[in-house]
Amino acid sequence: MIFKFLRLTVLIFLVSFSMVAQEYEKIDGVWNAVFLDHSFSDKFTLRSEFHLRTVSFLSVWNQQIIRPSVTYNASKNLKWTVGFSFLRNFDRDVNVSPRIRLEHNFWEQLVYNTPTKNGLISSRLRLEHRFLEHVPLQEDRSLRSFDFGSRIRYRLTYQHLLTPEEAKVPINFVVFDEVFLFMNTNGTPFRFNQNWTSFGLKFQLNKKMVLNSAFQINTFKVTDDQYLRFRLWSNTLIYKF
């Protein structure tokens, strides 16, 4: 696990160093989400995700996402997931028409957890198969077509318990970094897409409900010398039936 940390640290350093001299456009926003989990057995869990994302704080839509998935718990610390995502992506310019670009994607995911004395280290690898509406968008939706592409994402998360385990509302400090890479037709990662960095708190409200609240910075590559930087307040409520 130490070697994983070292590799990720080097990767983050190289990406950060390569973007130091680049031009950034800064955008503020809020991402809110609700996850609903239903366990069919000790091995299988159905999750339904609903994401509402805005920019200019709460005034302009950024994305709306519906994401169902099924997880197989191979062991206590190993999970496999398959899912589908439906996305409505909004242009930040509210005067643009058409403003909404649709995306459908299928994805597979592997999560491996390593418990520590007072926390947890989690590695997540996700492969996405994306169908995005071709741009420029057509006013007549029947004339629109979809482009296909694949993307791989790797997230490393660390959470540390801040309160006694017997606390009425246990609180964890959570930090993660996630790198997105586009893949070519041969299935090889070849180009940087974006990076997410987040740190915040996880509240175990009761046995069924968890709230995550964090500050998040997302960096998107637009061109070789231009980037978008989203500064977000992110909130996720997880409810287990």
Image (tube, grey):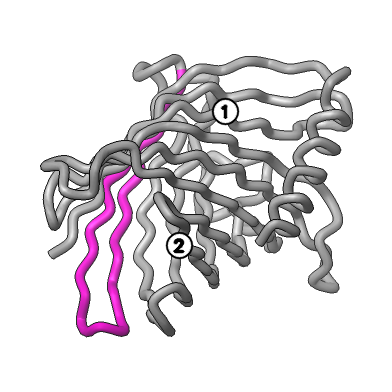
Q: Secondary structure at mark 1?
A: strand
Q: Which residues are magenta?
A: 33-55
Q: Give the number of the disc on residue 217.
A: 1
Q: Position of residue 70 (x, y in %)?
A: 36, 75
Q: Residue at x 84, y 21 (%)?
A: 20
Q: Residue at x 36, y 54 (%)?
A: 66
Q: Give the number of the disc on residue 115.
A: 2
Say few, some or many: other residues with alpha carbon within 10 Å of mark 2 (under 14 / 14 to 19 / 20 or more): few
Q: Residue at x 31, y 84 (%)?
A: 43
Q: Position of residue 144 (x, y in %)?
A: 59, 53
Q: Earlier in the sequence, mark 2 or mark 1?
A: 2
Three-letter residue code for mark 1:
Ile
Q: Nearer the viewer, mark 2 or mark 1?
A: 2
Q: Is residue 145 magenta?
A: no
Q: Give the number of the disc on residue 16.
A: none
Quarter of the view holding residue 46: bottom left
Please tell me whether the stretch drawn in magenta is mainly helix, strand or loop. strand
| Above or below 80: residue 203 | above
